[in-house]
Image (cartoon, rainbow, N blue to C red):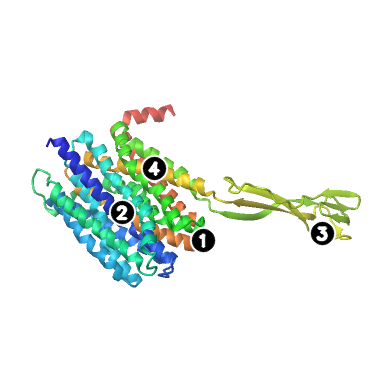
Amino acid sequence: MSNLSQSHKILFINTLAFTICFACWTLNGVLVTFLIDKGIYSWTVIEAGWLMGIPILSGALTRLPIGILTDKYGGKKVFTWLLFLCAIPLFLIPFADSFWGFAILSLLFGVIGASFAVGIGYTSLWYPKEWQGRALGIFGMGNAGAALTTFLAPSLLNYFSESDPENGWKLLPITYGIVLILIGFLFIFFTKEKLVQGESKDIKKLLQPLKSVRVWRFGMYYFLVFGCFVAYSQWLLPNFMNVYHTTLVMGGMFATLFSLPSGVIRAFGGYLSDKYGARKVMYWVLGSTMVISFLLMFPKMEVYTAGPGVLSGNNGVVTNISENKVSVDAKVYEVSPKIEKQVSKAPVFPVKSSWQEIVVEENQSIKKKELLAKGITHIKFEANMWVYLVLVILIGISWGIGKAAVYKHIPEYFPNEIGVVGGMVGLIGGLGGFLGPIVFGYLLTSTGFWTSSWFFIFAIATICLIWMHKTIIKAIRKNNPEFTTQIEQKQ
């Protein structure tokens, strides 16, 4: 078998395994929502957020040590053991009967999220520099595993629960565990080990790159484009069910429409990063995130506020009142009555209605500039579900491209520490997936509306864009001071 064929074979198995691992990693998004919706457990919104976030936390925290193990012992060994060991807590979930039981087992099976650090290090060794963006982009398509769960798991849960509504759900984690075991055997029989050639490094040398601020900046980008992607791949299902009253299966379909394109387009993001440069791609990603998250901030709402009223032009006495007129002595003032606007079933834009209500009585003495009829303005915004869905899909696509752009940097700046640096960046990104549902839960509880989570996204995107731009400007001034001076003189 040629070297390229062997590389493509490893890439295919790596991507398949990562897709399955990612599906397992985001399992709680569907499972916890189902258990609450069916009344099997009465967990609060905040407890649900914790259960969705806990697997993401363990997967994030173990990415760095798993990345180190991959650099030291090889991707085949580490990936195989990871698959087998993470299947065990999935088999035990049916025996959990409390929040803490679920939390502990979720913490254990969530380690499967560290498969990303293994796959990045293992895949990159099989490809030359000019192929890195595309190869890692294709591998990163495994993020679409989140779509696999949101698409299949709701239907599987309904099918398993037909004959046993109380305990049928327990077959779902068992099914996931069996699939992990099968993929583990696929690794044993069809992959080949490969390690970085060079001197053996101790832990201190392996961790040396983590002193670089660049690693932490990449991690911040990844916190947004990967961590928030993971968070929303779980959060969107209860969001659609609560705000738009969809069924579990339909909500899962909509969540799939967010996560599937985001995962698949990651390969295209790798291609764009190879062709135009990762930095330019990140400008577009962060800018589009700010714009779209701003549009997504506005919740379903009805607002009543003071509108233009009717004031008396002079002193006098109210002589006559009708539905749309007030007479003060001989002068007649027009009043706008309340008229219900006929609107489409699902308006895209806010609908505004204004009217006036008379506040005076007949024979009442009136002074100049006194209020005769108060103005009322009613603004109703339905937050059209289809517009919301399109915007969510667009931001998911942007993040999919961004995920590849972030990881394009790593082999260029840290060619011999891909596992460690990739693990650290993945760890920070994974923390976004852990913190996301928890922060969203607290924001929902404190504000009372679901779109409050997009304020958080807007803030993170703004921080990332400012940090990146300031870093680039600083580098330009340092490497080409004459050019900077010329610009400042021209201004």
Residue type marked 4: Ile
Q: Which residue is mark 4?
A: 397
Residue displayed at 57% across by 51% down = 382
Among the two numbered marks 4 and 2 on one chain, the one whose residue lies closer to the N terminus: 2
Q: Of tags 3 and 1, which is closer to the observer?
A: 1
- Give the structural element (helix, strand or loop) at label 2: helix
Residue type marked 2: Ala
Q: Mark 3 and 2 residues: CB-CB less than 8 Å, in contact?
A: no
> Distance of mark 3 from mark 1, alpha carbons?
37 Å
Among the two numbered marks 3 and 1 on one chain, the one whose residue lies closer to the N terminus: 3
Q: Residue lying farthest front?
A: 163
In the rendered image, residue 386, in percent from the top left (x then y), is placed at 51, 46
> Distance of mark 4 from mark 1, alpha carbons?
28 Å
In the rendered image, residue 187, in percent from the top left (x then y), is placed at 17, 50
Q: Mark 4 and 3 residues: CB-CB less than 8 Å, in contact?
A: no
Residue type marked 1: Gly
Q: Is residue 438 above or below residue 333?
A: below
- Give the structural element (helix, strand or loop) at label 3: loop
- Give the structural element (helix, strand or loop) at label 4: helix
Q: Of tags 4 and 3, which is closer to the observer?
A: 4
Residue displayed at 33% across by 71% down = 100
Among the two numbered marks 4 and 1 on one chain, the one whose residue lies closer to the N terminus: 4
Which numbered marker is on residue 23? 2
Residue type marked 3: Val
Residue neighbourhood size for the residue with mark 2, other residues' Cα within 10 Å, grouped as few (<14), some (14–19), many (≥20): many
Q: Which residue is mark 1?
A: 448
Q: Which residue is mark 3?
A: 360
Whether residue 161 can be seen here:
yes
